[in-house]
């Protein structure tokens, strides 16, 4: 969320760049290996969708849900 919050500065990550970075993150953070790769990709897509809805003023800002 912090990275997409930088939108007003002109630099942010899109979902494709984040999905492409997942294998590197899996090597760095071992707990990510416990989750299926498709589930992680879908989580990134859902987050990107929620931010796009937020910036279009359709929804409130994304929140973390456990």
Image: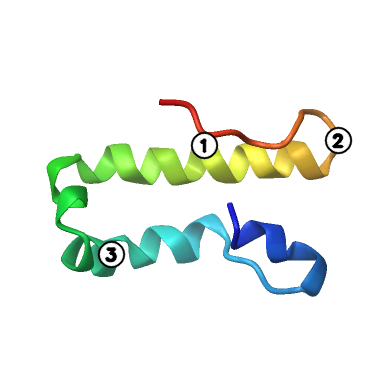
Q: Which quadrant would the C terminus be assigned to in this image?
A: top left
Name the residue at 58% across, 60% down: 14
Residue at 17% in and 67% down? 27
> Position of 10 compared to 32: left or right?
right
How far apart are labels 3 and 1 at the CA level? Answer: 18 Å
- Label 2: state its secondary structure: loop
- Do the residues bearing badges 3 and 1 touch, measured as CB atoms within 8 Å? no
- The circle drawn on residue 3 is none
Q: Earlier in the sequence, mark 1 or mark 2?
A: 1
Read off the residue under disc 2. Answer: 57
Q: Are the residues flagged by discs 3 and 2 in contact, CB closer than 8 Å?
A: no
Q: Position of residue 22 (x, y in %)?
A: 31, 60
Instruction: List x then y, in percent, for residue 56.
Output: 84, 40
Q: Position of residue 48 (x, y in %)?
A: 58, 46
Mark drawn on residue 46: 1
Which one is nearer the viewer's eye here, 15 or 65? 65
Tell me: residue 64, above or below residue 41: above
């Amino acid at each position: 969320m912090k990275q997409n919050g930088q939108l007003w500065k002109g630099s942010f990550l899109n979902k494709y760049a984040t999905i492409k970075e997942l294998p590197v993150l899996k090597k760095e953070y071992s707990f990510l290996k416990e989750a299926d790769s498709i589930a992680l990709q879908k989580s990134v897509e859902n987050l990107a969708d929620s931010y796009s809805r937020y910036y279009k003023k359709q929804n409130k800002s994304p929140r973390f849900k456990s």
